[in-house]
Image (spheres, grey):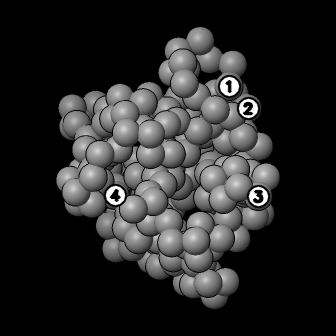
């Protein structure tokens, strides 16, 4: 099984310091949905692991998050792509959960759900916490320079095995041998 794990905000869609709180605020990064569609057509399982502390902060609720994800899935389906599953941490930074990145709990859940090792599974993020969580889980961390990626690339705490790409489209081209 070919599996890839993606962060959402800053990797697939434009991020916002004030959070993505509605479907109307969700806007795909140019080329990101096409990259996912290319991976889907090549029989990759595409999974999202996303911190969504806006729920804990009462900025939006689970139903609104569902509608945001439905918009993403609909736009993706229109170009022949799919998301196989979405794992969400709804907790705030002080809630002490194991699922909030940089902890690897969502990655552990993904491994369990798909009954697979995450050894060298590509995991794409734009923030240090994405890369730390994926590295702890045994994934191959990929940093994209969209979202927070430009700031993240200069951080001293980056896992040693991070590979950097311009965007998700470049990651897909690399994985599919066309770039």
Q: Position of residue 62 (x, y in %)?
A: 32, 67
Q: Which quarter of the rendered picture does the N terminus lie within?
A: bottom left
Quarter of the image holding residue 169? bottom right
Q: Can the viewer see residue 54? A: no
Pointer 3 residue? 178
Pointer 4 residue? 87
Q: Which comes sooner in the sequence, label 4 or label 2? A: 4
Side (left or right) of 129 relative to 117: right
Could you tell me which residue is drawn at 73 percent across and 32 percent down? Answer: 150
Please tell me which residue lies in front, 29 or 27: 29
Q: Position of residue 41 (x, y in %)?
A: 59, 76
Q: Residues within 10 Å of mark 3 (few under 14, many from 20)?
A: few
Pointer 1 residue? 153
Query: From this viewpoint, which residue is outermost toward the bottom?
Result: 78
Q: Residues within 10 Å of mark 1 (few under 14, many from 20)?
A: some
Q: What distance separates the C-alpha of mark 1 from that of mark 2?
A: 6 Å
């Amino acid at each position: 099984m070919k599996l890839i794990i993606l962060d959402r905000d800053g990797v697939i869609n434009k991020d916002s310091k004030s959070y993505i709180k509605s479907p109307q605020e969700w806007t795909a990064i140019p080329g990101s949905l096409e990259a996912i569609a290319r991976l889907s057509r090549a029989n990759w399982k595409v999974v999202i692991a996303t911190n969504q502390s806006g729920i804990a902060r009462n900025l939006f609720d689970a139903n609104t998050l569902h509608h945001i994800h439905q918009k993403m899935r609909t736009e993706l389906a229109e170009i022949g792509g799919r998301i196989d599953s979405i794992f969400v941490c709804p907790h705030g930074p002080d809630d002490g959960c194991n699922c909030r990145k940089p902890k690897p709990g969502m990655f552990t859940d993904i491994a369990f759900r798909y009954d697979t090792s995450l050894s060298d599974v590509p995991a794409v993020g734009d923030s240090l916490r994405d890369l730390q969580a994926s590295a702890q889980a045994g994934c191959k961390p990929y940093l994209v320079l969209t979202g927070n990626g430009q700031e993240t690339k200069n951080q001293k705490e980056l896992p040693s095995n991070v590979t950097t790409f311009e965007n998700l489209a470049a990651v897909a081209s690399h994985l599919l041998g066309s770039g």
